Amino acid sequence: MAGSLARVLDRFELTIRRFAHRAEPTKPTMWLKLRALTAMGPEPVLVLDGDTCVQRRIELPSLAPGQVGAVRDRRDGTPPPSDPWHVPGRPYINSGVLLLGRETEDLRARCLDLAATPEAALGRYADQRVWNYLLQSEAAERLVLLPPKLNAIRWRMPRRAVIQHFAGGARQAARHAKACQRVLG
């Protein structure tokens, strides 16, 4: 496995930054992702869920300092009006692919604060709930919608997809593994 990882890092010119992580009792994946973001410095960060597969070289748009890029989700997951996290009339994004521009440390820290609230742990996609609330309310002017090809969440993936997202949990695991094997050769 270590050799495979080294080849992928070399092929795609990637680096790994390590950080300390303490497992949380609820939503461990959400906490891992958010803690990783707060461990990063001020440089831009591309965050990919584990159920994604990069199909080709990624050419990302440049963001102004403080901006966050994300793709509109294929379904509007806005909470109902009775939910305290409900923010009407704003784009609902999928947090499986996030591009955090320079100087977004304040947003990363705020996400961690919001994630610590009991309401954040509700639902399947807790980190997505937190990001949507923040980018629909407190930081709405900082959201930049990215083209769907950067987070292609579809049963039949378009040929132009740069990043395929196999959202759907275990039922998508075989398709995800097969797509990644094709890319890695």
Image (spheres, grey):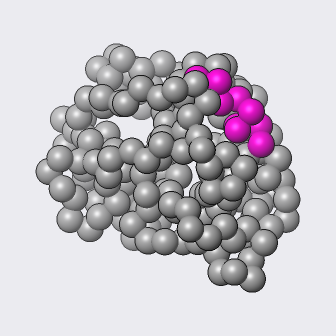
Where in the figure is residue 123, as x and y percent of width and height?
A: 66, 72
- Residue at x-position 32% and y-position 47%: 147
- The residue most toward the left is 159
Where in the figure is residue 132, as x and y percent of width and height?
A: 61, 57
- Residue at x-position 81% and y-position 57%: 25
Where in the figure is residue 103, as x and y percent of width and height?
A: 65, 24
- Residue at x-position 25% and y-position 52%: 178
Camera-nearest residue between 75 and 27: 75
Q: Is residue 41 above or below residue 157?
A: above
Residue 128 found in image quarter: bottom right
Residue 60 found in image quarter: top left
Q: Is residue 23 above or below residue 63?
A: below
Q: Quadrant of the N terminus?
A: top left
Task: Tell me if residue 108 is in the magenta stretch.
Answer: yes
Camera-nearest residue between 14 and 45: 45
Q: Is residue 56 left or right of residue 163?
A: left
Considering the whole magenta stretch, tell me its main secondary structure: helix
- Decide if residue 63 is in sight here: yes
Task: Tell me if residue 179 is in the magenta stretch.
Answer: no
Residue 2 found in image quarter: top left
Q: Quadrant of the C terminus?
A: top left
- Residue at x-position 69% and y-position 80%: 81
Q: Which residues are magenta?
A: 102-110
Camera-nearest residue between 9 and 115: 115
Camera-nearest residue between 103 and 149: 103
Q: Is residue 97 above or below residue 37?
A: below
Where in the figure is residue 145, as x and y percent of width and height?
A: 43, 47
Counting every numbered tag in the picture gives 0
- Decide if residue 170 is in sight here: no
